[in-house]
Amino acid sequence: MTMGSENNTTRVGFIGIGNMGGPMAANLVRAGFAVTVHDTNPEAAKAFAAEHGGTAAATQAELGAASDIVVTMLPTGQIVRSVLLEGRGLVEDLQPGSLVIDMSSSDPLGTRELGAQLARRGVALIDAPVSGGVPRAIDGSLAIMIGADDPAAVARAVPVLNAMGAKLFETGPLGSGHAMKALNNFVAAAGFAAASEALIVGQDFGLDPSVMIDIMNVSTGRNFSTESTIKSQVLTGDFASGFALALLAKDVKIAADLAEGIGLDVPLMRQTSSQWLMARDAVGGDKDHTEAIKAWEHAAKG
Ligand code: NAD
């Protein structure tokens, strides 16, 4: 994390004070930025300002007027586009020369379209989605994937991003960060699904799931989910990783749609996406993504 008072003059607006946005914006306040926050849930913005400082904006227009750089950390790219462009979109309240950093896990083609529309208004866009989940949002050590067409916009964003992340990667043109993020989450989601199916089969055969995970974690089957979320959320029955099922299902679908859009036949990606969409519909999108195993267990038993 880069701390420092040199950041005091940059006014950063942060939209989407949720599981990830809350701790990320708190790190911006801590780093010395003049932070204004907004959320459609006004309590979230007020509670944030009371706990961390910064200013709670009642409307996105108020936030726009108070920001040189706007960070979006919203559920989907569609919501990011609607915040900026629909009705009296936020773009109306931004000065030409402003920068928008979309840190949500959005769809790459939508991001490119948004970039073109904002550019017509003199507003720059970069995509900078993150990985690491809530724990690394809290300690400011997220991995950040930066897609941008304009190196000057990246240079402006780096001090802001350094306050939230430990590893910054430039992945290529606008939308490439969002493509990378979706592909990463496909790999993570496939790993979770593979470990879940192994547990479902093993348990039915008489193996102890917790012994299975201990064995996998010192064997070649280990992955992020066996080491982290399956151990800490599934085996404990907590199901509270802070990452909603609808959001992970959305990410895997973005990866599968991307593959289809460029004419590639990748059956595992397609199948993984449909498994997660099925789990979302069966268990509920607002549930923690780790609850997907319940849907698959139910389906396996017919
Ligand atoms: P969340 O649902 O906890 O937070 C989203 C926030 O946006 C909510 O507070 C909601 O009220 C607000 N919001 C929704 N529509 C709005 C609008 N039109 N204007 C203003 N505010 C609005 O979601 P999250 O888990 O923080 O995820 C945010 C993004 O980060 C998603 O794209 C997600 O895929 C991605 N992500 C999440 C995680 C994780 O572990 N939770 C990790 C990496 C990336």
Image: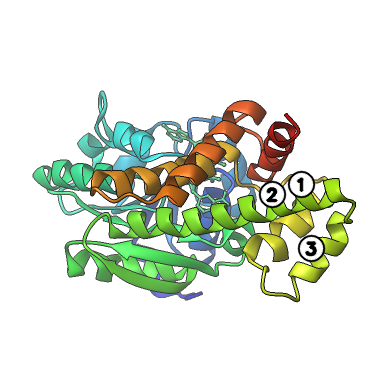
Q: Specify the quadrant of the image occupied by residue 226.
A: bottom right
Q: Is residue 214 above or below residue 277?
A: below
Is the Cβ of the residue at disc 2 closer than 8 Å to that at disc 1? yes
Q: Secondary structure at mark 1?
A: helix
User: Does 111 appear above or below 93?
Assistant: below
In this view, the mark in front (1 or 3): 1
Name the side, left or right, on which 280 lies relative to 157. right
Give the class, few, some or many, for how many residues have Cα within 10 Å of label 1's Cα (few <14, many ≥20).
many
Distance (Cα) linking label 2 and label 3: 12 Å
Find residue 197 and name its label: 2
Q: Residue 89 is drawn in which quadrant?
A: top left
Please identify the residue farthest to the front as the structure is shown: 205
Residue 222 or residue 60, whichever sits in front: 222
Q: Residue 185 appears at what percent x and percent y?
A: 49, 55
- In terms of secondary structure, where does tag 2 sit? helix
Residue 171 in the image: state x and y as whole percent.
30, 68
Circle 3 sits on which residue?
213
Residue at left 28%, top 54%?
A: 68
Seen from the viewer's position, the closer of residues 277 and 174 is 277
User: Given the image, on which type of amino acid does mark 1 rest?
Assistant: Ile
Q: Which mark is residue 200?
A: 1
Q: Residue at x 60, y 53 (%)?
A: 52
